[in-house]
Amino acid sequence: MRFYPVDIEERRELGGYTLLSYRWPDGSVQPGQFVMARVAGYPVTLDPFLARPFSFYDHDGEVASLLFEVRGRGTALLDRAPERIEVSAPLGHGFDIGANGTPAALLGGGIGVAPLKILSRHLTARNVRHDIFLGFAEARFAAVAAEFPGSKVATVDGSEGTRGTVLDAVPDLDRYGAVYACGPNPMLAAVKRVAGEDSVCQLSVEERMGCGNGSCNGCVVPVRDGGYVRSCIEGPVFRAEVLAW
Amino acid sequence: MVVRERTTRVDLAVELCGLQLHTPLIPASGTLAKEALGEVEGVYGAMLPKTTTPRPRAGNPPPRIAETPAGMVNSIGLQNPGVEQFLKDLDAFDVGVPLFISVAGDTVDEFVALCERISSDERISGIELNLSCPNVEHGGLTFCAGPASVEEVVAACRAVVREKPISAKLTNEGAVENARAAEAAGADALTVINTVPALTIDARARKVLVRGGLSGPAIKPIALRAVYEVSRAVNVPILGSGGVASGQDVAEFMLAGATAVQIGTTSFVREPHTILEEFAGFLRDTGMSAAELIGALR
């Protein structure tokens, strides 16, 4: 797997999350595509050994950004990265925003809000009307909602917005012609159940990844026709009806 | 292209079972998807796609991988579309270098049927027997659980594969005894070693996270010792495998006795191009060819 060193532009704390921006002037990025990122490779870091997958939070043609929560050693190192990180991108299949119904609902759960920023920007550029709904465990994380003007927020502990999950912040999901969601897999399964039968529902899954280029078969999700497919190649965005949840 | 320019002054070629390999590097089975072939153009002296089985296998439910220090534990479960679909898709891996196919079955008969099915395919240069899968006729012990089992399956495959080399892929445990048995049964080569049995636990959830095989630089010294000892016990060539992460690692495996060296988990985090360039640099520094390096410990 080929990684490229990139210069960090900015590091911001957004509530419980870190927003890391870096120079990425090459090529275009589709909403929902992802990055494998690390502070350095072998032999500088043998532990953690693998890179980490992150959705593109945004990309304006010059600067790309990643939103993440420090959960383990890999993300802790990225959070403290002084000047450069290494990335491999853009990877995977993102959201299909070409032929969907309107209006669109964008649902993010926890760190799953990440791809909604670039998705919202692309939808706006296409004049697609859309509403954004964000769910968090608590208010500390909900601070990132300020980056999504007009979004509706739910927190599980009720410390901000509606008490409950992101679905509790959506009064009528079945009236939307298109549903885009990213978050923990149980949340995505719930979104799939609630989304209107006629809507185009696309889910960006969260899986542990080894390689990011299809080789290790570690990041699979179960599909309706039986068996598993790789979230790094066939995903990470899937049409809801494809998944066996 | 860069690799070729920078390696023209060194001789990377090795001969493996009568096949000419322009480099001693081979992808370890199950670590190179066809989608990633573009990244490794010109690097590998032979190709080796993911293990195929008689019928499609869905593989194991997630979680399938867990990162560990200097490596990872995987339990993929031989997910693959089955041999018929595998052969339809095989052209992607037919890139002008010898093509080895890794096969696995639940029984000796399945190994034999697979070997018969693929051995006449002109695209295929050789077969690697993945002996780390459970033998359902022997209570689920793997085919390389002991020399008798190794000998049985290798001999049965040898009987139907007359003109193409067979390499028996062995685990670390019992490698020397199993290597002798495989050689006696007619194996042309040995792949040493497969992943090392390992377990990860999620302490907070009090659950087993992944029970599978450890790979990556963490197992390199284990693999190196197995290659070293097997090479002293048999006369057939060895495909060294296990934690190879750098050009120097390639040199170490060849010095220990390997004729070719497989790159697996490290290809997820490094470019195999880089490993080949490092190895070429090593040869340039020492003034030796790759072939001269094999077993050349002082």
Image: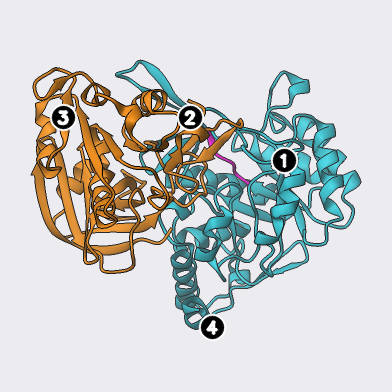
Chain colours: A orange, B cyan
- Whether discs 2 and 1 lie on one chain: the answer is yes
Instruction: Find the distance from the CA under tag 1 to the CA under tag 3.
Output: 47 Å
Q: Chain of mark 1?
A: B
Answer with mark 2 or mark 1, whichever residue precedes in sequence. Answer: 2
Q: Chain of mark 2?
A: B
**Neighbours of disc 4 within 10 Å: few (<14), some (14-19), many (20+):** few
Q: Amino acid at mark 4?
A: Thr
Query: At x 64% / y 52%, what residue is drawn?
Result: B49
Residue under numbered circle 4: B8
Indicate which disc residue A239 carries.
none
Answer with mark 1 or mark 4, whichever residue precedes in sequence. Answer: 4
Stretch in magenta:
B192-196
In this view, A23 is above or below B69:
below
In this view, B33 is above or below B138:
below
Regarding mark 3 in the picture, which secondary structure is present there? Answer: strand
Regarding mark 2 in the picture, which secondary structure is present there? Answer: loop
Residue under numbered circle 1: B82
Instruction: Find the distance from the CA under tag 1 to the CA under tag 4.
Output: 40 Å
**Neighbours of disc 3 within 10 Å: few (<14), some (14-19), many (20+):** many
Q: Amino acid at mark 3?
A: Val
Task: Residue B186 in the image: state x and y as whole percent.
Answer: 84, 47
- Whether discs 3 and 4 lie on one chain: the answer is no
Identify the image quadrant of residue A194.
top left
